[in-house]
Image (cartoon, grey):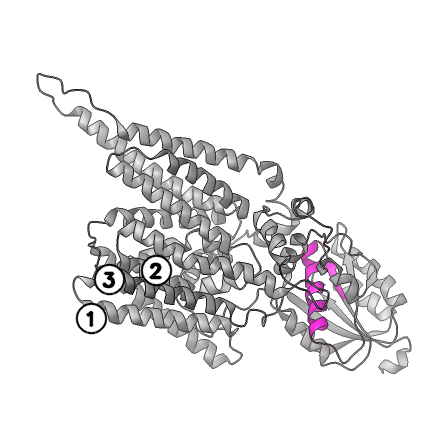
Amino acid sequence: MQPLQPSHRKHLWLLCVSIALGIGLRLINLTDKCLWTDELATLVFSLGHSFQPIPLDQLVTSADLLQPLIPDPHLNLNGVIEHLLGESNHPPLYFLLTHLWLQVFPHPDGLVSLWGARSLSALFGAAAVPAIFGLGYLAFHSLWIAQLAALLMATSPLAIYLAQEARHYTLPILWVMASLACLITATRALTERRTLPFWVVLTWIAVNGLGVASHYFFSLTLCAEGIVLLGLASRHLQTNTQSAKKPTGLEAPPPRKHPLRSTWLRISAVGIGTLASLVVWLPFLQGVQDSEITQWIHRGNRVGLEWLDPILQILAGAITMLYMLPIQASHAPITVASFVSLVLIAIWTGFKINRGLRRLGPDRHSIHILGGFVLGAIATFLIITYGFEREVTSAPRYHFVFFPAVLLLVSAALVQQWSSSRSAFKQTAIIVASLSLLGSMTVVSNLGYQKTHRPDIVAQAIREQPPQQSLIVIAHSTHGQTGRLMALAWDFKHHPLPQPDPLYLLAHIIDQPASALIPLDRALEKAPSPLSLWLLEFKGVPEERLQATLLAHHCQPAPQVKSATDGYRYRMHLCSSDQSQQN
């Protein structure tokens, strides 16, 4: 693919526009969306706090729940590492950076700054725009491919969604691109029969180590790169075998140096160094797969069409890398129309990409490497999903593993059409970029990629009830349930209730779900009356025993207040010490 040669100043301005657009989109409405459980985990652990001081099986207040969100200047990075590795299943790099970053921001209401926490992720997300520009130029030597990739990164709905989360996904995206740059450099050295520079070896090892220290799923990026390298090694071995079988002349050729052997040895050194960086985390990974924190991704006993779910989830996630429409709008007709439109747009885009990739130019090497990487990553996801019954395809955020490579392939495919028709390329690029921008606006407007949990909906349901004391009880297993109550307390802190401040109970489950009824019974004995009782996540508790406990405390169900929203299953009961008041 021949690089286009417009003035460098023009491309500098275009890149600046993409960077500014990327920053602006990531900062729009940054704190408007509700704070949810995973983000609360980021805040608590990054501050050096723990979830454990929040009492279980006792009545607590909003102040008790929000205590871990109060910054303490006496806590340092050691506390971040200690509590994170002891209570969670994530590596510490992003949390350490967040700890340092949050010290810059004031906290006038006494709590940690949500804007500060989310802005770090947004900053890393914005940095991905110039980063993918550099990677695109390195891979294809084309400023136009690099420009289009930067623009798509700036407007990608998936990228905006990840950047507006106080979570550790935008940082590993940078490490993914840096590692891909090393992969492309190494494979190009193999193709051109050059020795891989030693500084690339050291950089590659360092990047891979930092990637794993940011998110354990970065290891899936390494698996995909390994698949690409194994494919190249197999092809080189086959070529050498065929060359050895060819008849030679009477005189033996002069001995030659073997840059391929040297490069493969250095790639092997990268593998050993990367493996060493993975081994460091093995003591912390023991038990993670079967821990209660990760049980939500367990999926077994598929039936019928359920076997297609992982493939459909990958396709859906891939679409949102480019497009998003208001599929989570409150009106069903808009949702249906958006879904149908997304499918049609995806089919049209797939046709354009396929036609572009068939017109491979001189730089088809990078297309093969990136294409093999994406296929290797998808294969790894499917092996984990089907083979180990861990549905890692269900969360689009995990697609950061191969997300930048997809944008580069799309950009290269579209620019491939330049040689046949400049006008067609411009029209296609404008349509794709415009639809991508529309998708990003959908995300920042909270009409797509809403928060995984919606405490704001539950909080609003509580506000709409009579002005009396509320008791919010959740069946507790891990700090995930603690986070759900903390999210409600955070919402009430920033949007005060017309009722008295609620009381909360973390009814801890010991062995069997029914054990949550013991602290519930004790709490109802101590709680004031009359009382609005809200039960969260009590689905697993035996219904007959639950109803017996509630009737013993004169609690009658409110059928009109029983619902489920993202992350919450809730229902309300009205309780009174005088049973006649309920009749």
For the point 76% across and 65% down, the residue is 473
Question: What is the x, y in percent for residue 420?
Answer: 16, 63
For the point 68% across and 44% down, the residue is 78
Question: What is the x, y in percent for residue 426?
Answer: 25, 69
In the figure, 25 relative to 73: above or below? Answer: below
Q: Is residue 403 visible?
A: yes
- The quadrant of the picture occupied by the C terminus is bottom right
Residue type marked 2: Ala
Question: Disc 3 marks which residue?
Answer: 7
Instruction: Identify which residue, 91 or 225, lies in the foreground.
Output: 91
Question: Disc 2 marks which residue?
Answer: 149
In the figure, 438 relative to 299: above or below? Answer: below
Residue type marked 1: Ser
Say which mark, if any, is on residue 377: none
Label 1's element? helix
- Of marks 3 and 1, the one in the foreground: 3
- Give the mark, 2 or 3, whose residue is nearer the N terminus: 3
Tell whether 140 sits left or right of 494. Answer: left
Residue type marked 3: Ser
- Give the mark, 2 or 1, whose residue is nearer the N terminus: 2
**Is residue 502 a member of the stretch shown in magenta?**
no
Find the magenta span and give its range: 473-497
Tell me which secondary structure the magenta stretch mostly adopts.
helix
For the point 32% across and 54% down, the residue is 136
Q: Measure the alpha-carbon separation of dots 2 and 1.
A: 19 Å
Question: Disc 1 marks which residue?
Answer: 423
